Structure formats: structure tokens, C-alpha cells
């Protein structure tokens, strides 16, 4: 199933659940059962929060990658989410941590420039810092993401570093389940793949 079809299926499922929940709430209110009505109202509120959060997270990951791509036309741009290590690295390098959560999960984009990897925040007009290219500068690894250890991409040059969870599929990445996307990001950043923007 393609990403577009998955999004359509996800949207249809949410609409069906929402409609059923609203109809059930109306029927519960007509039956005069306030306890059951409270449960259905709580369910609808939780569902609304989840939908809004998912929409915001997905939009931020895409807009961050699009912003970096617009300033580096033709370069490979890998969307991602920060890890806890990213804010620590930024602090040690004296780079901006503006808009980044200390436990990770904030939108980030990594641009593969000819001589370095650029680390971009969501509304940045330039990279926050760079990691020089080298034969072993890009590697798959593990990093702290929220309250757990997750698969991540590490960039290192001996002086600077970066660690992020790639977000080709923002919903899965937001849950810390990047899986094969880590290998895809390593391939894209090391030049194995064709140069493309991957929001």
C-alpha cells in the first residue's frame, strides 16, 4: 500500500470513528445516561487531540525539509526529528537550540551539501551548524528519543556531530519507529541514492 493510500485509509478510519462516536453520543444523551455520555465526550476530545497533534507533527516535519530545500536547490534533504543528543550537541557547539525540545521530537532537516552536512531547524534561514563530510561521517546508530532508545542516524567529523530520527514517514518517525528509514537516510546522505528532496 502506498503512502497516499495509507493516508486515505487513516483519514477514512478517523472519519468513521468520529461519526460513530458522535452518533453514539447523541443516542446516549437521548437515553438520559450522563455517565455514558461523559465517556463518549472524553473519547471525542482525546480523538480530536490525537488528530491535531498528528497533523501538526507531520506538517512541521515537511515544512522544515521544504524550507531547507528551498534554500539549497538540488541538494539531498532528509527530514527528521531531533534526539535528546541534538540539543546537547547544539549547546556544546554554541549553536541555536531554539524551538527544540530537550528530549527530542522537534522537526529538523539535514542537507547534504558538497563539503558538509547542514543541520536546519524548522524556520531557519541558514544552517545551525555543519558536520564535515568524510568517509565515515554518516552511520546508523541509536539515540535517546523521548523516554527510549531509538534507531537514528549519526553524523560525526571529530569536532561536530548530529543525531536524528529520519522522518520520511513522519507518523512512524514521531513514534520512534524509523526502522528501515535509517538505512535509507544513510544511503541518501552518503550519495548512494539520487539527489532528491524527501519531505
Image (tube, rainbow, N blue to C red):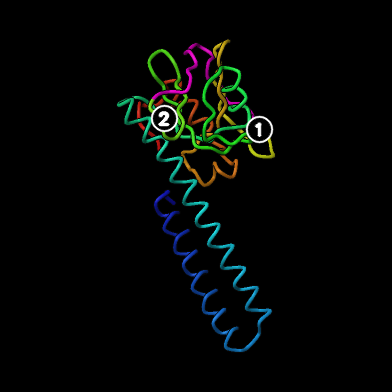
**Between marks 2 and 1 in the image, the one whose residue lies nearer the viewer:** 2
Quarter of the figure with residue 76: top left
Residue placed under numbered mark 1 in the picture: 144
* Crowd around label 1: few <14 · some 14–19 · many ≥20 (10 Å): many
SS class, disc 2? loop
Residue 41, image x and y in percent?
59, 72
Residue 108, image x and y in percent?
48, 33
Q: Residue at x 47, y 24 (%)?
A: 119
How much space separates mark 2 and mark 1, taking CA atoms? 24 Å
Residue placed under numbered mark 2 in the picture: 124
Q: Nearer the viewer, residue 98 or 31?
A: 98
Q: How many dots with numbers?
A: 2
Q: Is residue 137 magenta?
A: yes
State which tag comes first along the sequence, 2 or 1: 2
Q: Which mark is residue 183?
A: none
Q: Residue at x 63, y 88 (%)?
A: 32
Asked if 116 appears above or below 15 in the picture, the reply is: above
Asked if 21 appears above or below 46 in the picture, the reply is: below
Q: Which residues are magenta?
A: 126-144
Residue 177, image x and y in percent?
59, 41
Q: Residue at x 50, y 11 (%)?
A: 135
Q: Is residue 173 magenta?
A: no
Amino acid at each position: 500500500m502506498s503512502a497516499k493510500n495509507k493516508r486515505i485509509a487513516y483519514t477514512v478510519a478517523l472519519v468513521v470513528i468520529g461519526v460513530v462516536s458522535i452518533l453514539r453520543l447523541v443516542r446516549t444523551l437521548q437515553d438520559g445516561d450522563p455517565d455514558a455520555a461523559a465517556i463518549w465526550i472524553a473519547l471525542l476530545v482525546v480523538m480530536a487531540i490525537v488528530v491535531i497533534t498528528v497533523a501538526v507533527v507531520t506538517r512541521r516535519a515537511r515544512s522544515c525539509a521544504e524550507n531547507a530545500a528551498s534554500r539549497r536547490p538540488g541538494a539531498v534533504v532528509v527530514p527528521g526529528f531531533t534526539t535528546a543528543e541534538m540539543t546537547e550537541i547544539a549547546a556544546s557547539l554554541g549553536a541555536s537550540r531554539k524551538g527544540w525540545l530537550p528530549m527530542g521530537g522537534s522537526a529538523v532537516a539535514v542537507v547534504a551539501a558538497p563539503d558538509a552536512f547542514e543541520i536546519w531547524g524548522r524556520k531557519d534561514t541558514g544552517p545551525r551548524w555543519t558536520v564535515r563530510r568524510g568517509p565515515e561521517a554518516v552511520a546508523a546508530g541509536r539515540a535517546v528519543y523521548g523516554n527510549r532508545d531509538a534507531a537514528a542516524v549519526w553524523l560525526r567529523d571529530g569536532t561536530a556531530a548530529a543525531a536524528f530520527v529520519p522522518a520520511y514517514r513522519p507518523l512512524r518517525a514521531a513514534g520512534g519507529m524509523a526502522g528501515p528509514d535509517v538505512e535509507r537516510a544513510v544511503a541518501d546522505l552518503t550519495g548512494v541514492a539520487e539527489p532528491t528532496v524527501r519531505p
